Amino acid sequence: MPQFFLNKRLIVLLISVILLVALIGFSLRERDRISKPEQFVRDIVGFGQSIIAKPATGIAGFFDDVKDLKHTYEENQKLKSHLDSMASLEAENHDLKKENESLRAVLKKKNSLRDSQSIQAQVIARNPDQWYEQIVIDKGEVNGVAKNMAVITSTGFLGKITQVDKFSSTVELLSSPDTTNRVSAKIQSSKDVFGLIEGYDEKTKMLMLKGLDYNIKVKKGDKVVTSGLSGLFPSDLLIGKVSKIVPDDNGLTQTAFVKPAADFYNVSDVIVVNRLAQKVSSSNNGG
């Protein structure tokens, strides 16, 4: 009995294979028209494919868009990082360029000081409450700095040393309101005019050269330099230029308002003119 059923199943399988091959051959045969059952099957399959294909395509496109968006975001972050780095480099380059120019100017000024021994220094501290009064530099007693030495920048006279420590010194600026902070000066006009720098006008940001004889004639733009007569500073260190002349209340003298050559507000590199240079200049100028 089992052998009968086994043979029966084999016969059915063979008949099914033959029918399948016949159907495949029939469907592959070139025909002008296909049968309605075939057309129905094709329509059903095509409709099903379109239903499945559209959402699948949309989903695939959505994930592609998300992937592209992620890549765009990452690239944007990298670009922002590069831009930030470039901005930082540009700022650093600007500072270095400015510092280099300042050092070049100071070195040029240092080399131009005849018969002078000078000490190059940098500003290391400044009190906001005394911005126009004092600065602290990085050179002191061990570097040969001494009290009352002149301090200049590449553009002009800045002030004098008032306190000396081992490795640093305090400079009192010409813009200090201290009434005892005086500098013997002269105006280089058709005839040299001598006076004293006494005080700083906060309103006009100018130095005041006082004690000028009323009959003395000076012009706007005349240079004002150290006279060398006090014995403290070398002569001919540029202080500034005459901006205007104002008669004093007593009617006997007049005051010259001098536009400073040095920038008291923004200073980083300075030159200290040492005492030996002062002595040499004093002896050469009879002061």
Image (tube, rainbow, N blue to C red):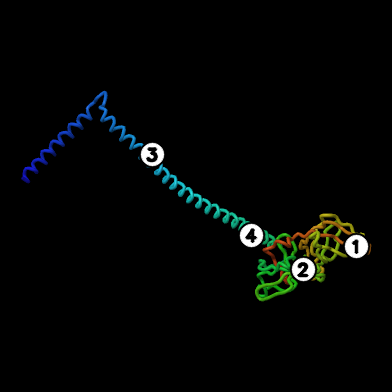
Measuring from the top left, give residue 266's x and y in whole percent: 70, 61
Label 2 or label 4, whichever comes before in sequence order: 4
Of the residues shown, which amino acid type is indicated by label 3?
Answer: Lys
The residue to which callout 3 is attached is 54
Label 2 or label 1, whichever comes before in sequence order: 2
| Mark 3 or 2: the one toward you | 3
Crowding at dot 3, Cα within 10 Å, few <14 / some 14-19 / many 20+, comes out as few
| Mark 2 or 4: the one toward you | 4
Residue furthest out toward the top: 32
The reply to whether callout 2 and callout 4 are in contact (CB within 8 Å) is no
Task: Report helix, strand or loop for mark 3.
Answer: helix
**Is 73 above or below relative to 185?**
above
Of the residues shown, which amino acid type is indicated by label 4?
Answer: Glu
In front of the other: 58 or 68: 58
In front of the other: 151 or 77: 77
Gap in angstroms between the C-alphas marked 4 and 3: 66 Å
Label 1 or label 4, whichever comes before in sequence order: 4
Q: Is residue 98 left or right of residue 45?
A: right
Which residue: 73% across, 71% down? 161
Of the residues shown, which amino acid type is indicated by label 1?
Answer: Asp
Crowding at dot 2, Cα within 10 Å, few <14 / some 14-19 / many 20+, comes out as many
Crowding at dot 4, Cα within 10 Å, few <14 / some 14-19 / many 20+, comes out as some
Gap in angstroms between the C-alphas marked 2 and 1: 27 Å
Say which mark, if any, is on residue 248: 1
Measuring from the top left, give residue 184's x and y in whole percent: 82, 67
The residue to which callout 2 is attached is 233
- Quarter of the image for residue 146 reads bottom right
